[in-house]
Image (tube, rainbow, N blue to C red):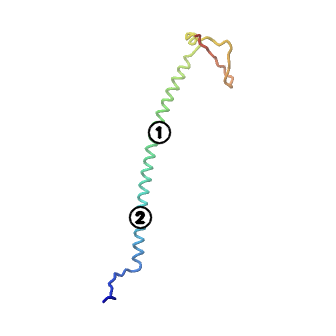
Amino acid sequence: MNDLHLQHHQPPYANNRHRAFWTLAILALTQIGSYGYLVNASVGHVVDRMNYLKKSSALSTEVAKLETAYYTLQTKISLETADNLNYIRALQAAYVNESGAPIVLLTRNN
C-alpha cells in the first residue's frame, strides 16, 4: 500500500498550454496598456497644439496692433513736431546704416 500513490496525471501538452495562455494574456495586457497610453498622449498633444495655436493667434494679433500703432505714430513725426518739442537740428548729419538712406538726427535743447 505504501508504493501506491495516487497522482493526478496531466497530459504532456497541458503545461505548454498553461504557459502559452499566460504569455498571450500578458502580451494582450501589454498591448492594451500601450494602446491606451498612446491614445492618451495623442489627445494630450492635440489639445496642447490647439492651445498653442490660440496663444500664437492672440500674439500675432497683438503684434499687428502694435505695428499699426508704431506706423501711425511714425507718420506723425515731422520736423514741425520736433521743433514743437524743442529739438534742434543736428549741425552735421551722421549716417549709421549701410543702405545709404539718410537718417536725420535730432538733439534736444536742455
The disc labelled 2 sits on which kind of residue?
Answer: Ile
Other residues around mark 1 within 10 Å, as few (<14) / some (14–19) / many (≥20): few
The residue singled out by tag 1 in the image is 53
Q: In the drawing, what numbered circle is on residue 88?
A: none
**Secondary element at image label 2:** helix
Taking depth in this image into account, of 21 and 54 the one nearest to the observer is: 21
Q: Tag 2 or tag 1, which sits nearer the N-term?
A: 2
* Residue at left offset 46%, top offset 33%: 58
Residue ID for mark 2: 26
In the figure, residue 91 lies in which quadrant?
A: top right
The image shows residue 90 at horizontal and vertical percentages of: 65, 13
Give coordinates of residue 77: x percent, y percent. 56, 16
Instruction: Report x, y in % for residue 54.
Output: 45, 37
Give the side of residue 9 with respect to residue 61, left or right.
left
Q: Which amino acid does label 1 sit on?
A: Leu
Quarter containing the C terminus: top right
Q: For the view shown, which residue lies furthest in the left direction? A: 1
Where residue 75 sits, quadrant-wise, is top right
Task: Spot the residue most to the bottom.
Answer: 1
Left or right: 83 with respect to 91? left
70 on left or right of 93: left
Residue in the image at 43% along x and 52% along y:
39
Q: Quadrant of residue 32?
A: bottom left
**Which quarter of the rendered picture does the N terminus lie within?**
bottom left
Q: In this view, does 3 lie above or below 106?
A: below
User: Residue 81: where, in percent of width, then height?
Assistant: 56, 12
- Numbered disc in front, either 1 or 2: 2
Q: What's the residue at 43%, 60% (across, down)?
A: 31
Element type where label 1 sits in the image: helix
> How many angstroms separate mark 1 from mark 2 (CA)?
40 Å
Badge 2 crowding class, 10 Å Cα cut-off, few under 14, some 14 to 19, many 20 or more, is few
The residue furthest front is: 2
